[in-house]
Image (cartoon, rainbow, N blue to C red):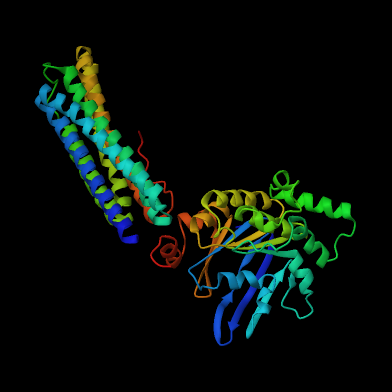
Amino acid sequence: MEFETKIETFNLNLFYGDFLALKDVNITIPHRNITAIIGPSGCGKSTLLRCFNRMNDLVEHIKVEGKILVEGQNILDPATDLIYLRRKVGMVFQRPNVFDLSIYNNLRFGLQIHRLLKHKNDIMQAIQNGLEHVNLWNELKDKLRKNARSLSLEQQQRLCIARVLILKPDIILLDEPCSALDPVSTLKIEELLRVLRQEYTLVIVTHNMQQAARVSDYTGFLYLGELIEFGDTDQIFTNPKEKLTENYISGHFG
Amino acid sequence: MRESFEKHIKEMNKEVVDMSEMVIDATSRSVKALGDRNVEEAKKIIDDDLLINKKRWQIEEKCINLIALQQPVATDLREIIAVLNIITELERMGDYAEGIARIVVILGDEPLIRPLIFMPKMADKANSMLKRSIQALVDRDTKTANAICNEDDEVDKLYDEAYNDLLMRMIKDPGLVSKATPLIWATHNLERIADRVTNICERIIFLATGAMPQVNVSKY
C-alpha cells in the first residue's frame, strides 16, 4: 500500500467514562481516496469517524488519548481551531439533516456562519457550484426558494453533501450516508462519492459490506474498539489476512 | 443465513465429486473400448459426454445463484470461483475421453497394430490423480494438491515412451502410419487429462490460500 497520508492516528484510545471504546487504534487514511470503516454494531466505527473532526467533544465524560494528525497537525492539541477544523473536515450523517429552511438558505447557512462570502453573486456562484457537484443544479435551479424538506431523501442527502462541499473541505466524513435511502438512490450516492474522490479524501462508515466493497479503495475492520485489519478493499474482500476479518465479512458473526 | 450458505457449498462440492466420477468413468471406459475394439461402447461414451456437459452447466448455474443471492466474499468467493474453473477443466477432460471414443469409431474393425501397453497405465494414473485432487478440493488440502502436480511427470514419461514406440514402428513400416497416428492422438488426450488435473490443483491452492501458484508445468 503506497499512498499520501491525510489522517493518521497514533495509539488512539477513547473512553466513554470508564468504557474503553477505541483501543490503541493506529490507522492511516489516504489522501484523495475512499476509506471504508466496517465492523459490527457498537465496535467504535462512528466514534472513530467522529474523532477526525473532534465531534466527540460534544459527548460528556469523554476522554481521548494518543495523537490524531490531520495533514500533520495534531488536532487533539488544545489550541486547535475547532471551527476551522470542522470546516476542513466536513460530515454527512445517516439521515439527511437539512434545516427547515429553503434550499438556498440551507446552502448559504455555512457560508454565513463561517463568514466566507459576502457578495450575493459570489454566494450564488458557490451555491451553483455546490449543487452542480452533486448533480442537483439542473433539477433545483428554479426551486431554490422551496423548503429543503420537500425534496426526496436522496435529494436531501445530496443537498447535505453540497452543503459540506460549499465550505471547501479537504476531508468528508460520511456516517452511514445511504442507510435511509433505497437501493437506486444508494447507487447514485455511491457514484457521486466516486466522483468526489478525485478532489476530496472521504471516510465512510457503513454497515453494508457490499457498499464498502463497491465504493471504497481501502477498508479498515474494527472489532470491539480495535483495528483488526486495514488494507486495499479488494484484498480485504478476497483474501483477508486476519481470520476475524474473514469471519465478519463472510457473515459468521456481526 | 450462514448455515444455509454452507449447506449450498457442501452440495456444490458433492456435485463436483459426482462430475469427476463421471469423467473418471468416461476415461477408463474409452481406453478399454479402444483396447477391446468395442465400437458400440465407444458410441455410448460419446453420447454420455452430453451428461457430463449437462452436469457442468447445472453446477455453473448453482455457482451463479450463490454469487447472486448470497454475495460471498473471501474464502467463500474463492471457493465458488475455484469450482467454476474446476468444472470447466472437468468438462474438457470429458471431451478428451470422448475424443478417444471417437478414435475407436474411426478405427472401426481395423485390428490394433499392437495391444495397448502405455494407455491403460496413463489412464489409471490420470484417474488416480483426478480422484485424489477432488478429495483435496473437498478437504482444502494444499499439501496433497501440490504433491499431485508433481505426479504429472510420470504421465509425461509414459507419453514419451508411447510416442517413441509408435514413431519407431511407423519409421520401420510406413504402412502403419494411418493406424498408428490415431493412437498417438489418443495417447496425447490422456496426457492432456493429467495436465488438467494440475490445473485443478492450482485452483485448490488458490481457494485455500488466495495465492495464484505456478505449479509443476507439463513439458507438453
Residue B181 as seen in the image, left or right of residue B68 = left
On the image, the x and y values in percent for residue A158 come to: 66, 54
Q: Residue at x 35, y 38 (%)?
A: B218
Dividing the picture into quadrants, the one containing residue B56 is top left
Residue A91 versus residue A241: which sits nearer the camera?
A91
Residue A201 as seen in the image, left or right of residue A128 = left
Dividing the picture into quadrants, the one containing residue B178 is top left
Is residue A250 in view from this perspective?
A: yes
Q: Is residue A48 above or below residue B196?
A: below
Q: Residue at x 61, y 52 (%)?
A: A189
| Position of the C terminus of chain A by quadrant | bottom left
Residue B111 as seen in the image, left or right of residue A61 = left
Is residue B202 in view from this perspective?
A: no
In the image, farthest residue toward the right: A119
Q: Is residue B201 above or below residue A159?
A: above
On the image, the x and y values in percent for residue B129 come to: 24, 45
Q: Residue at x 68, y 79 (%)?
A: A57
Residue A175 versus residue A226: which sits nearer the camera?
A175
Q: Residue at x 11, y 18 (%)?
A: B111
Residue A235 versus residue A252: which sits nearer the camera?
A252
In the image, farthest residue toward the top: B175
Dividing the picture into quadrants, the one containing residue B160 is top left
| Position of the N terminus of chain A by quadrant | bottom right
